[in-house]
Image: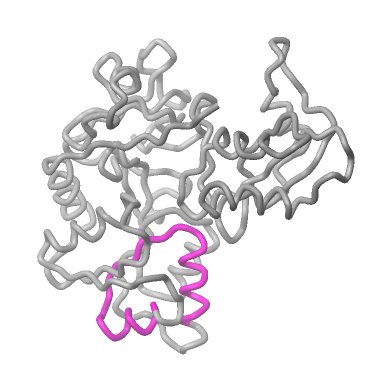
Amino acid sequence: MDVVPRGAVLTHANVVTANLTAIACIGYTAVDRYLLALPLFHITALGGALAHMHAGGAVVVVSRFDAEEAVRLIDRHRVTHVSDFPPVLTTLLDAAEKLGSRLPSLKHVSGLDALPTIQRLHAQTGAQFWTGFGQSETSGFVTLQRVSEKAGAAGKPVPLCRVAVVDDYDREVGVGTPGEIVVRGPLVFQGYFGQPEVTAYTFRNGWHHTGDVGRFDGDGYLHYVKRKPEKELIKPGGENVYPAEVETVIVQMDGVSAACVYGVPDVKWGEAIKAVVEVKAAGRYTAQQVSDFVASKIARFKRPHAVVFTDALPRTAEGAVDREAVKVKWGAAP
C-alpha cells in the first residue's frame, strides 16, 4: 500500500489569522524573542516565528538544536519563548542546571510534554507552559491554555474558531462524551494539495474533520482522547509517522509476510515506534536489521525503536491484521 503525503494548503489569510490569534491569546509584543529551534516545515515552528515577527518581536534562528547552546542564546538574546516537543524541554532544563542558569528571560514554553517535565519548568524558572490542540490543517492551535489552568486538558477554543465534538453522523455529543473533533473558521486550511476527494471528505457537512477524538468537560475545556482508527498516527518528538508507511517498508524484507506498527509511550520522545513483524523463520532477522532497513528506505525518524518477531500476527475474520489484538498481546512497553 502506498501512502501519499498530504500537503495542507494554507493561505496568507490563514497565516495572518493564526498570527493574530497567538498575539491575542499568549500576548506577544515587540519585546518578545522566539528561539526557532524546531524545523520550519513544522507548523509550530513556522507559526511561532511568523507570529513573533508580526508582533514586532524577533526570532533567534539555530541550524540545529543543541541544549547548552540554546541556554546561552536564551540568556544572551533574552529569549522569551521556546516551542517544545520531547525531549527539547528536558534537555534544555538539564543544560540550564549544568550552566547555572535559571533562564530569567523565559516567559513561555508551548507544545506538548509530560506533566513532571512541565512541573519542573515551573519550579526551576518563571516561565509558564502552554498547551492546546491543533494541526497544520488548522494553521496551528485551535484550543489553548496554560497547563496550570487545568492539568490534562487541551484548553478552550480560541477566538474566531468553532470547535465541536461529534458522533459518526456529525451530530454534536454532550459534555463528557467522546467524539471526533471538528473545526471551522478562518484558521482552517483550504484543502489537501492535489487530492480533491480527500479534501471533500474532510470538509463534509461544513466542518474540517480532524480524525482525532476528544471530549469537552463542563467548564468548556477540550480533552484529547485518542486518534480515530482510520487516522492511526505516531508522533515521536512531534513528528508525524503513519504506521502504514513503515509497515509497507518492513514487508519488503525477504521472508516477512506482515507487520503491525504502532506507538508506545517513551520518556525521551513522548512516543516511540514499535513494530511486530511476522516472519516464519525464527531468528532470521534482528531488531537492529529491521530498524536499519526502514531507515535506508524512508526518513530515519520513522524507523522502529522496538521490534519483536512472531510467526503469526492475529487477524480479523476478513484476514486483515487485527491491530487492537496486536496491541493487547504485545503491549505498550518498548
Q: Is residue 273 above or below residue 69?
A: above
Please check the rendered image and state whether residue 82 is part of the magenta-colored stretch, yes or no: yes
Which residue occupies the foreground of this view, 319 or 230? 319
Q: What kind of colouring is applied to the model shown?
A: one colour
Toward the front, the furthest residue is 254
Numbered range of the magenta stretch? 70-96
Q: Quadrant of the N terminus?
A: top right
Q: Tell me which residue sits at (45%, 81%) in the image.
A: 68
Q: Tell me which residue sits at (46%, 27%) in the image.
A: 176
Please check the rendered image and state whether residue 115 is part of the magenta-colored stretch, yes or no: no
Dominant secondary-structure state across the stretch colored magenta: helix
Q: Is residue 159 above or below residue 114?
A: above
Q: Tell me which residue sits at (38%, 51%) in the image.
A: 131
**Percent coordinates x, y for residue 12 in the rendering:** 12, 43
**Percent coordinates x, y for residue 103 in the rendering:** 37, 80
Q: Tell me which residue sits at (59%, 40%) in the image.
A: 246
Q: Is residue 143 above or below residue 230?
A: below
Which residue occupies the foreground of this view, 264 or 284? 284
* Residue 93 seen: yes
**Percent coordinates x, y for residue 163 in the rendering:** 29, 30
**Percent coordinates x, y for residue 51 in the rendering:** 18, 57
